[in-house]
Amino acid sequence: QVQLQESGPGLVKPSETLSLTCTVSGDSINSYSWSWIRQTPGRGLEWIGYIFYSGSTDYDPSLKSRVTISVDTSKNQFSLKMTSVTDADTAVYYCAREGRNSGYDWFDPWGQGTLVTVSS
Amino acid sequence: DIQMTQSPSSLSASVGDRVSITCRASQSISNYLNWYQQKPGQAPILLIYAASSLQSGVPSRFSGSGSGTNFTLTISSLQPEDFATYYCQQSYNTPSTFGRGTKLEIK
């Protein structure tokens, strides 16, 4: 059974870089696409971007200038970096696998989520 | 971006009730629509994909319907564990977008 686990600092200072890692167990990262999604009370669930195991990526246009998603197949991990954070980036961050079948895709499963607070 | 609008935003119901939640897309998304359930402090879990396909392991009391811009999630007979928040999500194009959720509460 595939499981995902987010890790990284829970507190980031404004203007600094948020860095999170998602470790995948029970499945090889050398398949599917892998996404980052965040959730806030004010804006709800927001898709940040995804990476395919080959390294190709796609990002939400509103975040694209600040976000990089990368993959480390040797560690079965993928990572999120978001630069120049503000308090608007305070959120619970989830990693998720993108399942696909016959052209349809969805997020399943998700990691448990990690709260990142942007504050000085 | 495609906007997803859910209604109602909250709903009170009793165990055994049949409930329906609707999701409307700002443009046609064919049947590229998924439904998730989220309980407090937990991550969302997938219930329905491609508008009407039940994810493996999800009870058959959950069903989805619709295409184009209008979609419905139906729970045929509410169980105590079904009280949660439900989200729709379009996978028609990127950026993928979610509805704001429907909170299902015990009456």
Image: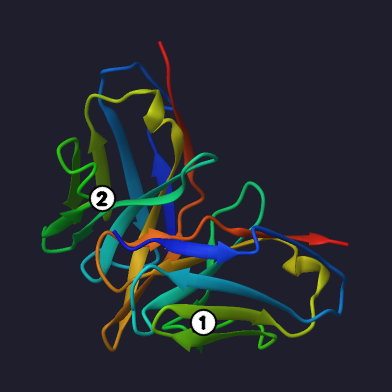
**Subunit of mark 1?**
B
Q: Where is residue B86 in the image (x, y as percent from the top left)?
A: 60, 64
Q: Which residue lies furthest to the top in this view?
A: A120
Residue A108 vertical placement versus A77 (above, below): below
Q: Name the residue under label 2.
A: A78
Q: Which of marks 2 and 1 is in front?
A: 1
Residue B7 vertical placement versus B49 (above, below): above
Q: Which residue lies furthest to the front in this view?
A: B26
Residue B12 seen in the current view: yes
Q: Which residue is found at the position 28% from the left and 89% from the top?
A: A102
Relative to A110, B39 lies left or right: right
Are the numbered discs 2 and 1 placed on the same chain, yes or no? no
The 10 Å Cα crowd at callout 2, few under 14, some 14 to 19, many 20 or more, is: many
* Residue type, mark 1 in image: Gln
> Which quarter of the image is occupied by the C terminus of chain A?
top left
Q: Which residue is found at the position 42% from the left and 55% from the top?
A: A4
